Image: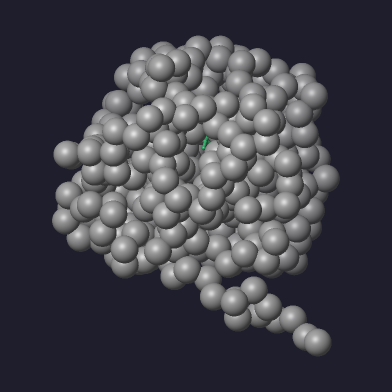
Amino acid sequence: MAFRYVDNELYVENVKVGDIVREVGTPVYVYSKNHFVSQFRKFDRAFKGNHIICFAVKANSNLAVIKTFAELGAGADIVSKGELFRALKAGIEPSKIVFSGVAKTKDEIEHALESSILMFNVESEDELLNINTVAKEKGRKVPISFRVNPDVDPKTHPYISTGLKKNKFGVPYDEALELYLKAKKLENIDIVGVQFHIGSQLLDTKPIYDASVRIAKLIKELQSDGIEISVVDVGGGVGIVYNENEDKEPSIETYAEQVERAFNGFDLKLVFEPGRFLVGNGGVLVSRVVYHKSNGPKNFMIVDSGMNDLLRPSLYNAYHEIKPLVKKDNKMLKCDIVGPICETGDFFARDYEIEDVKNGDCIVVFSAGAYGFTMSSNYNSRPRPAEVLVEGDRFRIVRKREILEDLIRGEEL
Ligand SMILES: *Cc1c(COP(=O)(O)O)cnc(C)c1O
């Protein structure tokens, strides 16, 4: 475990988190490089066949984090020009970048074309035609796959379920064949693959297997229509343990066995787009308790970070373990842990049992390595937290805490 208590004090790898807080202040995101590396290796080792792992950059876009994966040979799954910029800066090879997203603009397509990425995951006929037009202007042939919506229920939170007919993502399974035939006629389009991604935080990988079986069937149909598929992109979505008492970590070995079985007999390169699995449990958010108060029967522990720093509880009602930075045998308190933002939805936990952490002491929000800092904002004109990367017994600030001047950059009176 990257994060553990020794003599009641939290350590990340061999660094006392309290030492980081003393130097960097709060709120602060703290990441474990070794956790990222070991999660990547665990994922990589599980697959026997030809595959590449494209880190879903939206989960944690810090350059030092992306670089960690680049050094392990990872590619990147990007969803914007900004993420392309980051991935390239961090040293990801363009030939290992896949571009997802429903709204790629002409400008974004041009950028990705200039970098010669592995493929565009196309999500609509409009997008296909637009890519073809841009490619023609540039005199290029563009590798694409369609993101096909297998209409399989991933049994996860509705906001992170993406593979159902009612979701905006992908092209309908029943229309995929027709779209591939249209794409085949386009001069500047080079069909290479099929992609799907049915949702996030899947603790049971069976829905991914079910989707894979449906996609394998589609590939057979495509082949009999003379369309060669050499890449299958299985998306991301493998879940992690947020709640120690309720969640069970999915087995990567089972997942790998299921996916490889579904595509057995095809000569394919498999692409994976894990985000949360690689980084989620490798990060924490440390925050200082500012005040306590009670409104009648309800107790509040008020801390110095809020939904602008970590949005998941407010957006998804997501659960995060929260513990004291230093355990002190104070009495237990049942409280809402809330931030400074002027919104009722600004909370990290509700009716949460925690050792009463006194004003001035710190709490730690666990499992904040994915969709933490990347979803942060300056709402309420709050400078965003620093990010710190720990490796062994050393730590390094990999993003400075924002200062007031950062808040008004580009503005004019
Ligand atoms: C968000 C996303 C991912 C990563 O999902 P995780 O649940 O973090 O693994 C991968 N692929 C696509 C297309 C996505 O939108």
Q: Say which quadrant the C terminus sits in.
A: bottom right
Q: Position of residue 338 (x, y in %)?
A: 59, 43
Left or right: 140, with 244 as reference point? right
- Closer to the camera, 352 or 245? 352
Look at the image and tell me in which quarter the N terminus lies.
Answer: top left
Where 91 sits versus 362, above or below?
Answer: below
Can you give x and y, in whole percent of width and height, for residue 52 in the image?
39, 40
Residue 264 location (% of width, % of height): 42, 16
Identity of the residue drawn at 30% across and 26% down: 46
Q: How is the image coloured?
A: one colour
Number of disc labels = 0
Figure check: 372 above or below 84? above
At horizontal 67% and vertical 36% (from top left) the residue drawn is 295
Q: Which is nearer the eye, 387 or 36?
A: 387
Please identify the residue farthest to the front as the structure is shown. Answer: 296
Could you tell me which residue is drawn at 41 percent across and 42 percent down? 357
Residue 287 is at least partly visible in this image: no
- Expressed as whole percent of the image width and height from the top left, the position of residue 19 reads 26, 59
Q: Please identify the residue farthest to the bottom as the structure is shown.
A: 413
Question: Can residue 410 be seen?
Answer: yes
| Image position of 171 (left or right of 398) | right
Residue 361 or 85: which is nearer the viewer?
Answer: 361
Q: Quadrant of ligand 1?
A: top right
Residue 54, image quadrant: top left
Residue 174 lies left or right of residue 40; in this view the side is: right
Tell me the residue at 63%/53% (across/down): 340
